[in-house]
Image (cartoon, rainbow, N blue to C red):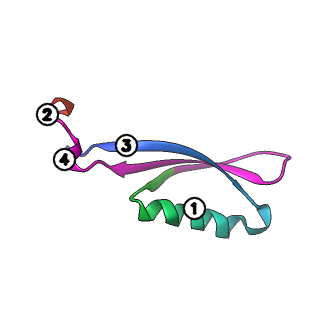
Amino acid sequence: MQRFEYRVETVSLDPNCFDEQLAGVLNRWGRQGWRACHLAIMPSEEQPSRARIVLERRLASWLLSDEDD
């Protein structure tokens, strides 16, 4: 059985280059094995814009104990 770990991050991004900054953040986490499984843009009148990202990555089998099954 596959097991995953999750993390939730909130990032602040400049609205003038939102897409580029978001891609950079996601690519950096992707190189660490994380995959974005949910993204929400948080409404705000403030600058910069904020996004909440839920990330997941598969746990290596050697990290699992027999009790996890």
User: Badge 3 is on which residue?
Assistant: 5
Figure quadrant of the C terminus: top left
Q: Is residue 45 left or right of residue 20?
A: right
Q: Earlier in the sequence, mark 3 or mark 2?
A: 3
Cβ atoms at labels 2 and 1 below 8 Å apart: no
Q: Earlier in the sequence, mark 1 or mark 4?
A: 1
Q: Earlier in the sequence, mark 2 or mark 1?
A: 1
Callout 3 amino acid: Glu
Label 2 Cα neighbours within 10 Å, binned few <14 / some 14-19 / many ≥20: few
Callout 1 amino acid: Val
Q: Is residue 60 magenta?
A: yes
User: Badge 1 is on which residue?
Assistant: 25
- Provide the secondary structure element on which disc 2 rests: helix
> What number is the disc on residue 66?
2
| Residue at image point 71% right, 50% down | 50
Q: Position of residue 31 (x, y in %)?
A: 43, 65
Cα separation, mark 4 vs mark 2, equals: 10 Å
The stretch in magenta equals 38-66
Q: Position of residue 64 (x, y in %)?
A: 21, 40
- Name which quarter of the figure residue 65 lies in: top left
Cα separation, mark 2 vs mark 1, equals: 35 Å
Residue nearer the viewer, 66 or 3? 66
Vertical placement of 38 versus 28: above or below? above
| Residue at image point 76% right, 61% down | 14
Label 4 Cα neighbours within 10 Å, binned few <14 / some 14-19 / many ≥20: few
Which of labels 4 and 3 is toward the front? 4
Cα separation, mark 3 vs mark 1, equals: 19 Å
Cβ atoms at labels 4 and 2 below 8 Å apart: no
- Provide the secondary structure element on which disc 3 rests: strand
User: Badge 4 is on which residue?
Assistant: 62
- Provide the secondary structure element on which disc 1 rests: helix
Q: Is residue 48 left or right of residue 58?
A: right
